[in-house]
Image (cartoon, rainbow, N blue to C red):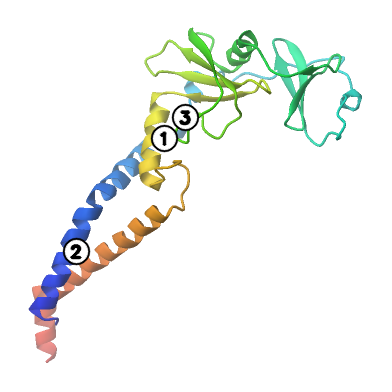
Amino acid sequence: MVNRHTALKIRKTHRYLGLFLGIQFLFWTISGLYFSWTNIDEIHGDHFKNMEYQPKAFNNLISPSQLNVSQGINNIELRDINNLPYYWVNKKQLYSAIDGSPKNSITKEEALYIAKNYMKSDLVVENVEQINETGKHHEYREKLLPAYVISYKSDEALKAYVSVKDGKFQTVRHRSWRWFDFLWMTHTMDYEGRDNFNTMVLRAFSLLGLITVLSGFLLWFTSSPTIRKFKERRK
């Protein structure tokens, strides 16, 4: 058995580590409970989306080889923008799939058309605005900018995002997603950008958490009457 002085040191270390890590342990527990008890499809906003939407089919499109793309085409997607077909080429430029003319951006009206296809028909638009930049904690981070933000009349502060340059419906954000995002930040401990699971802070707290648990086991071992009696019997 360890002496009383060592046991007191272990107890003191365990107590202060627990006090220091307790708040983060609480965040990990709360966020873990939230993640396990929520429906991820609802977090993604699927209950606001028109899940039966099928992209429109077009006829009489020009061949992509007719487009004036000097560097050649290595990636192409078809877009429906206000009932007109467009090619999104090389993830850089829109071209009319009817006459090949380039299109540098979409309008607010075109963004509303796109959002209407992807969102439920009973939603009422409240406001449309354009954003040109976002911070590391913005709900639309790491997606194509600029973008139109379409806000709907809803208790969930519902917003849809459509990128200006390629006319693509990007994502949906609402209150439950924002709670999820905040708790995700506390879970990963990435307080700079939220999505990095390999931060030094997380590694340090995980290591300290392991030390706290091990010190608790050691504290039990050094102070347990059962262990003490067992050792005395073996003498």
Pointer 2 local density, CA inside 10 Å: few below 14, some 14–19, many at least 20: many
Q: Is residue 81 left or right of residue 30?
A: right
Describe the element under mark 1 as helix, strand or loop.
Answer: helix
Residue 26 x/y as whole percent:
26, 46
Numbered label attached to residue 139: 3
In the rendered image, the vertical position of residue 154 relative to residue 201, given as above or below: above
Considering every residue shown, the one lying at the far bottom of the view is 235
Marks 2 and 3, how far apart in space? 38 Å
Q: Residues within 10 Å of mark 3 (few under 14, many from 20)?
A: some
Mark closer to the chain start, 2 or 1? 2
The residue at which mark 2 appears reads as 14
Residue drawn 45% across the image and 28% down it: 42
Neighbours of disc 1 within 10 Å: few (<14), some (14-19), many (20+)? some
Q: Which mark is residue 181?
A: 1
The amino acid beneath tag 2 is: His
- Sequence-first disc among 3 and 1: 3
> What amino acid is labelled 1 in the image?
Asp
Q: Which amino acid type corresponds to the residue marked 3 in the rendered image?
A: Glu
> Considering only vertical position in the picture, is 75 above or below 78?
below
Expressed as whole percent of the image width and height from the top left, the position of residue 117 reads 61, 14
**Marks 3,1: beta carbons within 8 A:** yes
Q: Quadrant of residue 114?
A: top right
Q: Quadrant of residue 55?
A: top right
Q: Position of residue 64 (x, y in %)?
A: 87, 26
Alpha carbon separation for disc pair 2 and 1? 32 Å
Q: Residue at x 85, y 18 (%)?
A: 100
Q: Is residue 70 above or below residue 163?
A: below
Q: CA distance from mark 3 to mark 1?
A: 8 Å
Are circles 2 and 1 on residues that touch, CB within 8 Å? Answer: no
- Left or right: where 51 falls relative to 15: right
Residue 192 higher or lower than 94, as above or below: below
